[in-house]
Amino acid sequence: MTEAISEQPGGPEGQAMDPADPVFEGFYGLYTITATDRREVLGYRLALLAVATGQASLLWLWSHGGTVLWPLLLVMALGLGLALRWIHIYVRPLHRALQLFWLLGCLGGLALAVRVGPAQMLPTLVADSRWIWAVGPFFAALAGVGFKEFFCFQRAEAVGVTLLLPVSLLGRLTGLLDSTTTFTLLAIQAGLLLVLCLRKFPMPAAADVGDKSVFAYLENQRQPSNA
């Protein structure tokens, strides 16, 4: 992990930085964590927490006979969309791929809602696993976020999120898992996601931002005339 240093360099185009912003030495040079970075990190963490609490609440209510669950699906959709808006992934094609998966999954969920009505979305998914093809990309995006968290921080709970989502959904889709086993795996995954989110809040913003000098380098590679 990079360490903060005391000197205050100029910005990427010679602009002065706020003296209150911490400066770090990255792989390709110095960079600073700005107030905008800190807001984006907080937004990312809160949005991902919304996904975790939405999923955990949905599964708990479903197990206790709840029927009006579609608002929690909406919370999950909006939360993951915002998390993917503010997540710091410097490999742009990967970032765009996760956003595309999210969009495809949301469109699949919308198609399901139009077909059977919002109140029947979950019962239909349980009764007809073929609809997993429609909503599956959403959970692929969420698994991608889990993989990013494991890649950056090596957290055990991130491994659970990354692996349990595809195992449970693909197992149900192929008929290898029954609905009870699928529900159990998803409940464990939701709990691990909640743990992952809560453990992120004490971390400094710089941990989620990463090495901005790498981002600047990659941007220059994409735009040789500005290098």
Image (cartoon, rainbow, N blue to C red):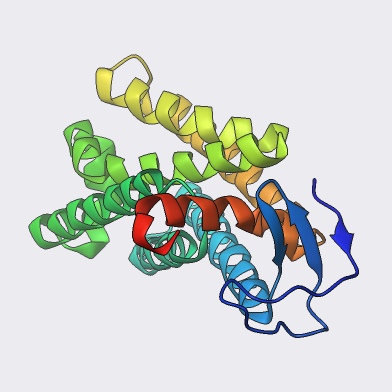
Residue at 71% across / 82% down in the picture? Answer: 17
Question: Looking at the rendering, in which quadrant would you find the N terminus?
Answer: top right
Relative depth, front residue between 15 and 148: 15
Q: Position of residue 225 (x, y in %)?
A: 35, 61
Question: Looking at the rendering, in which quadrant would you find the C terminus?
Answer: bottom left
Q: Position of residue 85 (x, y in %)?
A: 43, 65
Vertically, is 114 above or below 14?
above
The quadrant where residue 41 appears: bottom right
Tell me if I can see residue 95 in this picture.
Answer: yes
Vertically, is 121 above or below 175?
below
Q: Is residue 43 left or right of residue 8?
A: left
Looking at the rendered structure, the number of numbered marks drawn on it comes to 0
Outermost residue toward the left in this view? 115
Q: Is residue 227 left or right of residue 109?
A: right
Outermost residue toward the right in this view? 6
Tell me if I can see residue 89 in this picture.
Answer: no
Q: Position of residue 62 (x, y in %)?
A: 44, 51
Relative depth, front residue between 115 and 100: 100
Q: Position of residue 200 (x, y in %)?
A: 73, 56
Residue at 33% across / 24% down in the picture? Answer: 170
The quadrant where residue 113 appears: bottom left
Residue at 54% across / 66% down in the picture? Answer: 47
